[in-house]
Amino acid sequence: MKRSADNKLKVVAVRVNPQVEHRLRLLAEATGRNQSFFLQQIIERGIDAMEETWRRRSRKSVAGIFLNCSSPGRRPISLATDL
């Protein structure tokens, strides 16, 4: 992606466990790329799958709301609990 004033990359801080950081560091050293390159690739390639997973869960939650509303005394589930 060519950078311009309209599409400047943003900084995101992420905490990872030491084993993941170690693997990332080794990969970066072995390839001569920086860790940010690999993190960006992982995020860009994985976000579609994560979004689809959450969409499916949300659809199930919405279906559950309608099912739960028809039962007396049961409260509908909240979509915000998984966010």
Image (spheres, rainbow, N blue to C red):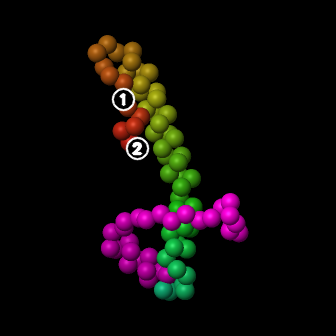
Dot 1 amino acid type:
Ile
Residues rendered magenta in the picture: 1-28
Toward which corner of the image does residue 64 lie, by quadrant? top left
Q: Tell me if residue 66 is in the magenta stretch.
A: no
Dot 2 amino acid type:
Leu
The answer to whether any part of residue 56 appears in the image is yes
Quadrant containing the N terminus in the rendered view: bottom right
Mark 2 vs 1: CB contact within 8 A: no
Left or right: 56 with respect to 2? left
Mark 2 neighbour class, 10 Å CA radius: few under 14, some 14 to 19, many 20 or more: few
The residue at which mark 2 appears reads as: 83
The residue at which mark 1 appears reads as: 77
Farthest residue, direction top: 72
Q: Is residue 67 above or below residue 17?
A: above
Q: Secondary structure at mark 2?
A: loop
> Residue 68 or 40: which is nearer the viewer?
40
Left or right: 34 with respect to 65? right
- Gap in angstroms between the C-alphas marked 2 and 1: 13 Å
Q: Secondary structure at mark 1?
A: loop
At which x and y percent is residue 44?
A: 57, 61
